[in-house]
Amino acid sequence: MKYQSQAVAKPYFIAAIGLFVGQILFGLILGMQYVWGDFMFPEIPFNVARMVHTNLLIVWLLFGFMGAAYYLVPEEAERELQSPFLAWALFWIFLIAGALTVLGYLLVPYAQLADITMNDLLPTMGREFLEQPTITKVGIVIVALGFLYNIGVTILAGRKTVVSLVLLTGLVGLAVFFLFAFYNPTNVVDDKYYWWWVVHLWVEGVWELIMGAILAYVLIKVTGVDREVIEKWLYVIIAMTLITGIIGTGHHYYWIGTPDYWQWWGSIFSAMEPIPFFMMTVFAFNMVNRRRREHPNKATVLWALGTAVMAFLGAGVWGFLHTLAPINYYTHGSQVTAAHGHMAFYGAYVMIVLTIISYAMPILRGQEASDPRSQVLEMWSFWLMTVSMVFITLFLTGAGVLQVWLQRYTEDPQPFMVVQEKIEMFYWLRELAGAVFLIGLIVYVISFFVKGGERVTIGSSDTA
Amino acid sequence: MSEIFTKSMARNIYYGGSVFFFLLFLALTFDTSGEVPKRDNHEAIDEQVALGKQVWEENNCIGCHTLLGEGAYFAPELGNVYKRFGNSTDAIIGFIKGRPVEGIPGRRSMPQFNLSDEELAAVAAFLKYVSEIKTARDWPPNIQG
């Protein structure tokens, strides 16, 4: 660790992993409810478990992004963080606000939570992924502002690198587009139109900038490849991200009461959205192949290559599968969508956060890389989680294709619940794969507490 | 990448490309906002529909159902439920009202939300309003949603 203030990243990473565990436990509850309809009913109905599952995901990824920024920005800017105290304060505010919100979901009926938090004053609740009480949303904005101030001043007063500027652009974009969460018109078409300015412009826009910047930083560190080369790649990748992804928002504007021309704009541009992800894969493998050093942290290299590949498969390939309007006409809002969502989020965002944690955590704990035995376990967890996510995606895709066929494509379309029963086997298999994912996650957590093993290193390695 | 393609060229493509396509997106949004009123059934929006949307949101209906294909995939599409229920708001009200408190053993069941008569009428009116939005190709593909 070159700068003392980088240490503030550690609690952010620990919180991220803790919430990740919670997210997966609720994922398993949801998977069980798909096959055993009244599992935990009426105490934890599906909608509550789903809110917890998706909101925990968003919150822990934000913890991960913030931790990444606190870790890498001082090093890139070559100065201490502007205010480590502010970073600590915001950590507790965000953690407590997040915990209270989740407890609110679990302990009182949602309508009562809306009542207690005075949703009437500025109704923003009850929209997918934006279920947080308005007061929580205000808290998120405050935390984001404090965070951006801290990071922004550190970057602007220090060395400005492409990595840190792209990261800052992504983080500012994240905060700016979140403001559309406060716009909730009664007109459903308008509501949906601008809801996507948060959701799509986050995950298929500015979050990709954050991902690209973190990946570029880690690749600089573990491969020793010249920064100039990596930064050029980063520019090209994020250029393609925004060139395809902004108009690509149109793939959400096919069937919600918006004009027909979006079927053309959305199809053409979103069909190109896999390009930046493919470039990211080529980039990661290229840099690792051209490495000038053997970094002792093998697990990080695995995560870095893994996130590029899985983001391409999940966001790129599985996104493309149902993005063309004539296909989406049938698949829109089916299990095909769920399949894509799972692998895309895991590949692009879960894995990039685990990449930076894998790289930074040993250094934050006073080692250049974890002990070999710990790394072996970490790599086992990589394969367990990644392979089981591939299977979750495949089973959901199977369920989705059958669902679309029986409910929408045949001459004699069948009711939703009839179809759900016919595809139950796929849901069982998905739940099984989910259990393996949990085992992988447990192995991942254990890997932090394992020591020892013999290091086999070729050549020298200077501390990053 | 070769030396002919420099980092500053890459940077210019990034800045130029993102600004251009964001402006194009704003232009399309501007055009859309002019087109939407022709098909969004806004004439139907009254106080009751507005209350209905609030009831819809404050009971997190989107946490299980889809509405015009967006939401969760645990329960049926509701963008056309008014039509599926024989163009009857009473049928919708009856269904919501009749959900058993303890669920149905072994099966998925909608929770009992204990809505007032006013809220029930409002959420049904809201679903009627949504079902009459003119979506492209009359999505969903058929009455089953």
Image (cartoon, coloured by chain):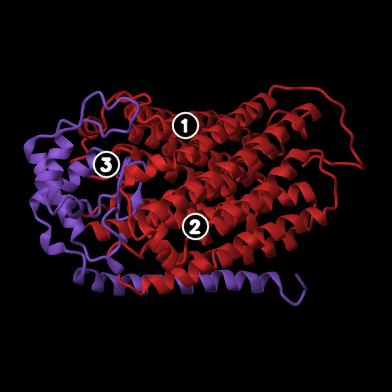
Chain colours: A red, B purple
Q: Secondary structure at mark 1?
A: helix
Which is in the foreground here, disc 1 or disc 2?
2
Numbered marks: total: 3
Say whether residue A121 is left or right of residue A312.
left
**Numbered disc 2: secondary structure:** helix
Q: Is residue A430 left or right of residue A164?
A: left
Circle on res. A204: 2
Residue A299, picture quadrant: top right
Q: Residue at x 79, y 27 (%)?
A: A373
As measured in the structure, the alpha-carbon distance from the residue carrying label 1 to the one carrying label 2 is 30 Å
Q: Residues within 10 Å of mark 1 (few under 14, many from 20)?
A: few
Distance between the alpha carbons at the discs numbered 2 and 3: 26 Å
- Residue A262, horizontal then vertical, whole percent: 37, 71
Q: Position of residue A41 (x, y in %)?
A: 32, 25
At 26% from the left and 60% from the top, the residue drawn is A190
Chain identifier of the residue bearing label 1 in the image: A
Residue placed furthest toward the bottom: B4
Whichever of callouts 1 and 2 sits on the residue coming sooner in the sequence is: 1
The amino acid type of the residue labelled 3 equals Cys
Q: Name the kind of residue labelled 1 in the image.
A: Ala
Element carrying mark 3: helix
Q: Are marks 1 and 2 on the same chain?
A: yes
- Could you tell me the amino acid type at mark 2? Glu
- Residue wearing tag 3: B61
Residue indicated by mark 1: A89
Report whether mark 2 lies on the same chain as mark 3. Answer: no
Q: Residues within 10 Å of mark 3 (few under 14, many from 20)?
A: many
Q: Residue at x 9, y 34 (%)?
A: B116
> In front: B54, or A293?
B54
Q: Residue A222 in the image: x percent, y percent?
A: 77, 46
